[in-house]
Amino acid sequence: MAGYKKEIDREKVQEIAENVFGLLSGAVMSGMVYLGDRMGLYRALEDAGPLTSQELADKTGLHERWIREWIQGQATAKLVEYRGEGRFELSPEAALVLANEDSPAFAAGGFCALPQQMAVLEKLPESFKTGLGLPYDAFGPEGARGVERLIAPWFRAHLVPRALPQLDGVVPKLEAGAKAADVGCGSGVALIEMAKAYPKSDFHGYDISKYALARAEEKKAQAGVQNVSFHDANGDAIPDDHSFDFISTFDCLHDMANPTPVMHAIYQAIKPDGTWLIADIHGLPTFEENLEQNPLASMFYGFSVLCCMSSAMSEPNGEGLGTLGFTEPVARRMVGQVGFSRFKQHDFNNPINAYYEVRP
């Protein structure tokens, strides 16, 4: 109504202001987590007992005054614990999240591409005007490294011992010698874990990121596995000969500008008795449900604007699913449209991902 002005609720103003400053605090502290990870400070604190800022500086070869300001901030954010008399300690539980990359709870790796992710904010106003997002490689080599460090702990801890055995008939095939592919393989962490576990099988990774594929080749050499091959999907597409026993797609379909043709290609590549394992973000079917029930929804929507939806809108007429767009009903509908007839959801106790076992 023209001229209508609602009376201001001062308490609500204060509440909103506190929320906004809380978000700003989180953004600033995210930068501090990035520095702690990059400078090796969390690793230096792990199993070290209570340390003063000078002792931590001596241990890392860094400047004490900078260490002191950083670690006092960490204590106020409750990431490290203050023990009194100027001493700070990283608890064993916090070490699993911030220092130990072999822990499935490790999360600090998700911050390593933070500078590159924040830098695209300068470019996104143009995307808001044109609708065209940024390509997946817009974050450079650190983007590929960041994705790898965020998701690798789950692959190393759970993929082979826990997830694959729950898929009907997949493990016996891989043990006997199967042909398998990971589409959107990134730096190849999942494939390399499977290749080490099932040396009789032949594994193929497909991706469009030149940075991820370069890291994949490095990881392959480090692991010493011979039964893995990586392919640039820009020119070396998965063959349409129904020859694959097992195909996986991990956290990538929602990033794709054109996921439907990729799904069709997977249908053409897989054997009639083959299995496709999909892992994607565990979003709820509607915005209203995410608003009320998903505690990570705001983070996911933010990542979507920065990364996922941007990538999914990086080509004209991109489908633009975004981080929370590939929900269970959407997944079921899309795979059915390209020919798959069997669909089963699994719970692998991952707070981020949903898992779907799909068959022709």
Image (spheres, rainbow, N blue to C red):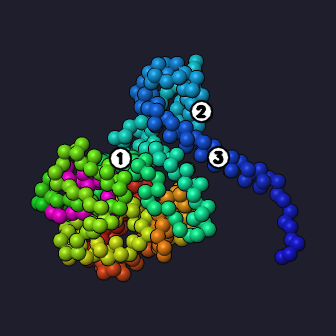
Q: x, y percentage for residue 331?
A: 40, 72
**Residue 194 within the magenta-colored segment of the rendering:** yes
Q: On the image, numbered disc 2 is attached to which residue? A: 73
Find the distance from the CA under tag 2 to the CA under tag 3: 14 Å
Find the distance from the CA under tag 3 to the CA under tag 1: 28 Å
Q: x, y percentage for residue 72?
A: 59, 29
Tell me the quarter of the picture where residue 246 sits. Answer: bottom left
Disc 3 and disc 1 in contact, CB within 8 angstroms: no
Q: On the image, numbered disc 3 is attached to which residue? A: 24
Part of the protein shown in magenta: 178-198
Q: On the image, numbered disc 1 is attached to which residue? A: 153
Residue 135: mark:
none
Q: Is residue 40 above or below residue 132?
A: above
The residue under label 3 is which amino acid type?
Leu
Residue at 50% in and 49% down: 116
Q: Earlier in the sequence, mark 3 or mark 1?
A: 3
Residue at 47% in and 56% down: 138
The residue under label 1 is which amino acid type?
Pro
| Residue 302 seen in the current view | no
**Residue 42 within the magenta-colored segment of the rendering:** no
Q: Earlier in the sequence, mark 2 or mark 3?
A: 3
Q: Secondary structure at mark 3?
A: helix
Q: x, y percentage for residue 339?
A: 30, 81
Q: Secondary structure at mark 2?
A: helix
* Quadrant of image for the N terminus: bottom right
- Label 2 crowding class (10 Å Cα cut-off): few <14, some 14-19, many 20+? some
Q: x, y percentage for residue 305?
A: 55, 61
Q: Secondary structure at mark 1?
A: helix
Residue at 35% in and 49% down: 152
Q: Is residue 8 left or right of residue 156?
A: right
